[in-house]
Image: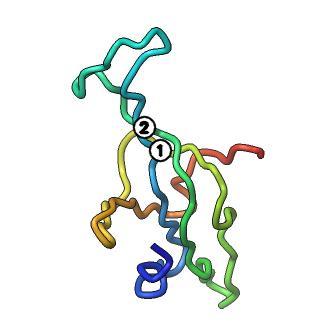
Amino acid sequence: MARAFKKFLPMFDRVLVERFAPELKTKGGIMIPEKAQGKILEATVVAIGNGARIQSGEIVPVSVKVGDKVLLPEYGGTKVTLEEKEYFLFRDGDILGKFES
């Protein structure tokens, strides 16, 4: 997996995330059908860009770091497939929040 990120680095204020896997069973052990599974809005940051350049030429760094758990919007992001795994690319400003660990 680490080799894939050496080949792909997000540009500017982009953040590459890996969404959490959906729950396949309830706590009681009942299987959840694929259509009934909700959209996963939580993810782990796996790579970040350098930051956005503002008019004065300064670079504003990205507000999250690799390994952070974040909350994503329900829609948006660009799907990226690296070594047969799906990741999503979001702008730093599109990320809704960060979970404290």
Quarter-of-image position of residue 92 = bottom right
Q: Is residue 8 above or below residue 84?
A: below
Residue 66 locus on image (x, y percent):
64, 67
What residue appears at the point 50 percent right and 45 percent down from the top-left corner? Answer: 72
Callout 2 secondary element: loop
Q: How is the image coloured?
A: rainbow
Residue 33 locus on image (x, y percent):
24, 21
Residue 99 locus on image (x, y percent):
70, 43
Q: Nearer the viewer, residue 57 or 71?
A: 71
Q: Is residue 15 above or below residue 73?
A: below
What residue appears at the point 77 percent right and 44 percent down from the top-left corner? Answer: 100
Quarter-of-image position of residue 83 = bottom left
Q: Earlier in the sequence, mark 1 or mark 2?
A: 1
Marking on residue 82: none
Callout 1 secondary element: loop
What residue appears at the point 42 percent right and 64 percent down from the top-left corner? Answer: 89
Q: Which residue is mark 2?
A: 40
Identified by mark 2, the residue type is Ile
Residue 84 locus on image (x, y percent):
27, 66
Identified by mark 1, the residue type is Phe
Q: Which residue is mark 1?
A: 20
Q: Are marks 1 and 2 in contact (CB under 8 Å)?
A: yes
Mark 1 crowdedness (10 Å alpha carbons): few <14, some 14-19, many ≥20: few
Q: Is residue 99 above or below residue 88?
A: above
What residue appears at the point 67 percent right and 84 percent down from the top-left corner? Answer: 59
Q: CA distance from mark 1 to mark 2?
A: 7 Å
